[in-house]
Every structure is written in structure tokens, then in C-alpha cells.
């Protein structure tokens, strides 16, 4: 499941902006195989912005992000066609990822009864589970999870937490941006709040 | 990977796979059908002006799917997920360009036959019309894709894209329809050249637009 090279992701003095406003600066961390990081912060502090910069979708305003290993991102948009039945919408990503045996992930996420349901009729929690199934099927070493627990019921929260634990124990890396507490062994915490500039004039 | 992308894009935009893409063809024939009712059934006049009407119908038909061409997949996060899988925006846009053209170009060329009958267009003119549409529609698709990508993050993007396409499509229209009026196949060479240039630029311009849309 894991890449042959040991996965790692690190941020060095990263700063991100939204519009003209500096959200945070001098944010650094270093994660290697088997490590998990809980990114906390109130709404609007820039957790999602940070996640997108870490994923390489945007370039940080300052600093750099170093990645070795493939990145999987789960955010509030599962990238599934709303008009297609869930099974066919997921099948597109299975084909793109060259996943030949998606049944396990579908079973684990309890999606089997939903395969014929068009994606637009699914609830937030069901969509989140579908996104997780697509992530599991990729088998990438670095997981960036943006609010993975929002919209999930108690049973699903326990299950997703267990999955993250399993991924990390297997030598993967997980970065989780979430308001909710996470029960994962060896979880480190990074509060975005502690990197907010005191004044807007402060250099990044 | 590319095959899977093209298959999804075609399913989204091709008429026979559901969705709203059957509209351009129906629209195209409907315009040709309504034109004689609007201007009268004089066969000479129809034959003289009919080709131009077909070209305008082709231009307008190319605008119809622009709204959902790029904006929807940005919103769904599909381009982001593909990017994480190592697909460049240029490849995504090249595939999308091909799918967009396939969804209206060939159907419009097929629809040109019944339209020619309805508009009393003669054989040689139909020949020029078909060749013109074949080399001109890829250019229209390329303009459409670039505009769709550039306006994707704007709230009034859909309304704007139609307006923007019209002036940019003028060169193709002038040479394409002009070939019919003068019975001059040479100007179709210009149409082909303009088309080729646009098709070459479009994936890069549209790809850059998608990347820029992320940095908000």
C-alpha cells in the first residue's frame, strides 16, 4: 500500500494570504512515516487554505512545502458527479487511479446500499464517506483530511478515527484539520492561531 | 488515464449520453427550419443567405454548453483531485477541448445536410459549407473553452461568456461565411489557420485560467 520511498511532508516558514490579509506566517512542521498531525483553529483562521497549500494546489505566499510521496486530499468537495449514481461516480476515480478492487473500501465505508443512488441525493455524511472510499482506493501515503468528521454520525466518527489510526500505524502520514477532538495514538497538535501575525505590518 | 478522462467528459457533453448536449443540434436544425418562415420562401434568396444562417447557428450552438463546460468541475473539485493525481491543467483542458468539439462539431456537420435541404442550398455551396464547418468548429470550440475557463470563477460568468465569444469568433465567421458568398475555397484556408492557432493556444490559456482561479 505504501510507496517504496519513506513518505514525508514538511512546511518551512509557510505564510498564506486570503485576499490582502495575512492569515498566518512562519508556520513550520516536519512529519515522517507513521506520524499524524491535528491542525486546529477557529473558523476562518486558514485551515483549508493551509491544506490546499500543503497539497500543492496553491503556492504559499512565503516559505515552502516539501513533499515526498503522493498526496491524497479529502475536503468538503468529494469531486463526484452529482447526476451520476454513486457507483458510477466512484468508478471514474477507480479507473483514473487504476484501482481494480474497490469493493473493500466500499464495504468499510458502508456504501454498498447507496451505489445506485445519485450523488446529489446523498447526505453530507454519506458524501464524506464516499470521498473517504475514493481516498482509500488510491492507496497514497500522505493523507490531508480537511474536516473529515463533519457531518458524520458517532459510529462513522469512530470508524474514520480507526481508519486514520490504521493508516498511520501502517507507515502513512495523516494531517487532519478538524474542530473535533481526535483519539489517535501519538497525535501531535498544531494550532494555526499561534501563527497569526500580531500586526498586519509584520513581515511574512 | 486520458481515456478515462475523455470518456467522462464525453458522457457529460455528448448528446446521446443524456445531459443537455442534444440541445445544440436541435437548435441548429430549428434555426434552419424557422429561417424560411421568418424571411419568406423565396428559393433564390434562401440559397444566397442560407449558408450564412447556418454559420450563425453554428456560432450560437457553440455558446450553449459554455456555462457548465469548466465552472462545474472547478466547483466539484474534480480539477483539484486530478491535479493531485499528477494530471496537468493543460492535459485536462486539451481533453475537455476535444470533448467540447465532439459534442457539437460533428453533430452540427451532420445537421447541415437537412439544413441545406430546408434552405435550398446547392451542391457546391453545401460542399464549401461542410468543409468550412469542419475546419471552423474546432476554432469555435477553442474560443469557447478559453472563455469558459476565464469566466468560471465569476458570478455572472455564464452571461459574460456568450457576449465575449461573439467578437472573438468574427474572423472565423467572416472567412467561413465569406467563402460561401464568393464561392471561394481559398478563404477556408484562413479559417483553418485561425482554428489551428486557437486550438494550439486553448489548452494552455484555459489551464492557466484554472490555476489562477485557485489563488483567490
Image (spheres, coloured by chain):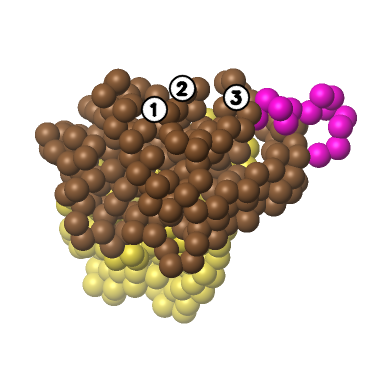
Query: Within the image, what quadrant is residue B73 found in?
Result: top left
- Label 1 and label 2: CA atoms lie apart by 7 Å
Query: Within the image, what quadrant is residue B135 found in?
Result: bottom left
Cβ–Cβ under 8 Å for marks 3 and 2? no
Q: Determine which residue is flagged by label 2.
A: A180
Q: Earlier in the sequence, mark 1 or mark 3?
A: 3
Does the magenta stretch mainly form a helix, a strand or a loop? loop
Q: Is residue B49 visible?
A: no
Chain in yellow on the image:
B
Q: What tint does the image give chain A?
A: brown
Q: Which residue shows up at 35% across the image and 44% down it?
A: A166
| Image: A67 above or below B178 | above
Please state the chain letter of the residue tagged with numbered disc 1 in the rendered image: A
Cβ–Cβ under 8 Å for marks 1 and 2? yes
> What number is the disc on residue A41?
3
Which region shows up in magenta?
A192-204
Dot 1 and dot 2 within a common chain: yes
**Number of other residues with Cα within 10 Å of mark 1, as a class: few under 14, some 14 to 19, many 20 or more:** many
Percent position of residue B26, x then y = 22, 46
Q: Which residue shows up at 26% across the image and 24% down it?
A: A155
- Label 1 and label 3: CA atoms lie apart by 15 Å
Amino acid at each position: 500500500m505504501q510507496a517504496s520511498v519513506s513518505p514525508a511532508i514538511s512546511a518551512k516558514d509557510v505564510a498564506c494570504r486570503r485576499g490582502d490579509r495575512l492569515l498566518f506566517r512562519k508556520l513550520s512542521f516536519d512529519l515522517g512515516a507513521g506520524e499524524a498531525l491535528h491542525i486546529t483553529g477557529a473558523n476562518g483562521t486558514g485551515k483549508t487554505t493551509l491544506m490546499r497549500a500543503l497539497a500543492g494546489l496553491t503556492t504559499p505566499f512565503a516559505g515552502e512545502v516539501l513533499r515526498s510521496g503522493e498526496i491524497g486530499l479529502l475536503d468538503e468537495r468529494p469531486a463526484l458527479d452529482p447526476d451520476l449514481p454513486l457507483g458510477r461516480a466512484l468508478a471514474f476515480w477507480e479507473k483514473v487511479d487504476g484501482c481494480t478492487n474497490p469493493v473493500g473500501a466500499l464495504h468499510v465505508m458502508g456504501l454498498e446500499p447507496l451505489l445506485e443512488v445519485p450523488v446529489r441525493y446523498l447526505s453530507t455524511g454519506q458524501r464524506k464517506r464516499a470521498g473517504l472510499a475514493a481516498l482509500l482506493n488510491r492507496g497514497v501515503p500522505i493523507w490531508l483530511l480537511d474536516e473529515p468528521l463533519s457531518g458524520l454520525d458517532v459510529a462513522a466518527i469512530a470508524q474514520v478515527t480507526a481508519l486514520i489510526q490504521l493508516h498511520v500505524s501502517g507507515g502513512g502520514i495523516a494531517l487532519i484539520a478538524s474542530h473535533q477532538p481526535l483519539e489517535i495514538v501519538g497525535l501531535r497538535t498544531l494550532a494555526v492561531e499561534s501563527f497569526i501575525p500580531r500586526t498586519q505590518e509584520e513581515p511574512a | 488515464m486520458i481515456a478515462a478522462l475523455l470518456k467522462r467528459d464525453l458522457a457529460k457533453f455528448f448528446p446521446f449520453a443524456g445531459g443537455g448536449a442534444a440541445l445544440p443540434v436541435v437548435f441548429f436544425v430549428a434555426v434552419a427550419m424557422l429561417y424560411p418562415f421568418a424571411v419568406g420562401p423565396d428559393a433564390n434568396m434562401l440559397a444566397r443567405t442560407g449558408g450564412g444562417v447556418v454559420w450563425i447557428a453554428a456560432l450560437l450552438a457553440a455558446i450553449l454548453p459554455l456555462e457548465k463546460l469548466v465552472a462545474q468541475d472547478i466547483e466539484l473539485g474534480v480539477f483539484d483531485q486530478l491535479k493531485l493525481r499528477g494530471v496537468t491543467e493543460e492535459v485536462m483542458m486539451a481533453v475537455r477541448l476535444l470533448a467540447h468539439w465532439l459534442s457539437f462539431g460533428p453533430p452540427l456537420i451532420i445537421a447541415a445536410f437537412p439544413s441545406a435541404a430546408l434552405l435550398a442550398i446547392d451542391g457546391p455551396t453545401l460542399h464549401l459549407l461542410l468543409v468550412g464547418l469542419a475546419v471552423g468548429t474546432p476554432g469555435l470550440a477553442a474560443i469557447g473553452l478559453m472563455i469558459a475557463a476565464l469566466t468560471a470563477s465569476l458570478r455572472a460568468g455564464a452571461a459574460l461568456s456568450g457576449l465575449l465569444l461573439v467578437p472573438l469568433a468574427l474572423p472565423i465567421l467572416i472567412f467561413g461565411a465569406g467563402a460561401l458568398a464568393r464561392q471561394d475555397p481559398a478563404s477556408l484556408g484562413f479559417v483553418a489557420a485561425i482554428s489551428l492557432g486557437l486550438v494550439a493556444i486553448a489548452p494552455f490559456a484555459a489551464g492557466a485560467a484554472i490555476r489562477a482561479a485557485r489563488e483567490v
